[in-house]
Image (spheres, grey):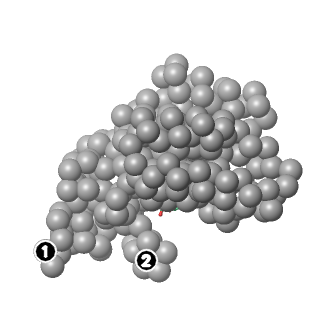
Amino acid sequence: MKKARVILEKAFKEGRNFLLEPEAKRLCEIYNIPVTRFNVASNLEEAKKIAKEIGYPVVLKIVSPDILHKTDAGGVIINIKSENELEEAYNKIMNNVKKYKPDARIVGVLVQEFAPPATEIIIGVAKDPQFGHAIMFGLGGIFVEVLKDVTFRILPIEEKDAREMIREIKSYPVLKGYRGSEPADEESIVSMLINVSKMIEDNPEIEQLDLNPVLVYNKGAKVVDARVIFRI
Ligand code: ADP
Ligand code: MG
């Protein structure tokens, strides 16, 4: 798709082989992958305006090509409930980042919708020199980090493959809901997996994609952080 190509070309022209979070989320939107509502502010006043449009609570994140792991830089503050808290958070992020990497180029501050806690999943894509692109799916947190409970397929995949992937992880019962917790919206995961497959089919220059975490609700889902590495 042309719109996706424009995003990758722009980053490439700026000498990057990766997308910033707002760019990666825009790419997701093009492929109907649901993300937290967002906009980039270049100053505090703009941040206030965007937060009002989105509605509190919001999250602020640093946007910089020199900062890949935003949390490490003190560049993420979540659950900001008012304009006063927003101002405090904005200044704090700027100070943190200045201390962490004084020469970091700052594009702006990402203001986004705060996604309330829910079942966390991760969707990843990596390119293997022999097999090409593979897609990974699993539950987030300890399920992936400790238990390595994930499943893989070579891309492209179809709906049938997406359904199989979801059902074959050991932690599938967690998605189904347990001890009274609500079941996660399996259909929203199916469509995200298929849409990621389409994205990679259209844009094979993407070498790595990380949607981590994605929060899955009883109805719908939201990508909270997105990372893309490509080679044009
Ligand atoms: P990093 O670059 O450090 O990976 P993230 O964007 O993943 O930064 O933010 C760090 C963590 O903050 C996320 O893993 C998630 O737990 C939480 N978080 C980030 N954005 C949101 C959001 N919009 N709503 C709720 N929680 C969020
Ligand atoms: Mg992250």
- Image coords of residue 232 (percent x, y): 69, 32
Q: Residue furthest top?
A: 2
The residue lying furthest to the right in this view is 103
What residue is shown at x 30% (from left), y 56% (from top)?
216
- Identify the residue at image location x=17%, y=65%: 182
Amino acid type, label 2: Ile
Q: Which mark is residue 70?
A: none
Q: For this view, does 39 lie left or right of residue 90? A: left
**Decide: marks 2, 1 in contact (CB < 8 A)?**
no
Measuring from the top left, give residue 82's x and y in whole percent.
Answer: 45, 52
- Residue 142 falls in which quadrant of the image? bottom left
At mark 1, the secondary structure is loop
Q: Amino acid at mark 1?
A: Gly
Q: Residues within 10 Å of mark 1 (few under 14, many from 20)?
A: few
* Residue 8, placed above or below residue 90: above
Mark pair 2, 1: CA separation: 21 Å
In-front residue for pair 41/195 = 41
Residue ID for mark 1: 180
Identify which residue, 132 or 206, lies in the foreground. 206
Q: Secondary structure at mark 2?
A: helix
Along the line of sight, the residue nearer the viewer: 181 or 168: 181
Position above or below: 42 against 229: above
Which numbered circle lies on residue 142? 2
Q: Position of residue 64 (x, y in %)?
A: 71, 46
Residue 67, position as x, y percentages in the image? 72, 53
Q: Residue at x 29, y 74 (%)?
A: 170
Q: Vertical placement of 24 versus 221: above or below?
A: above
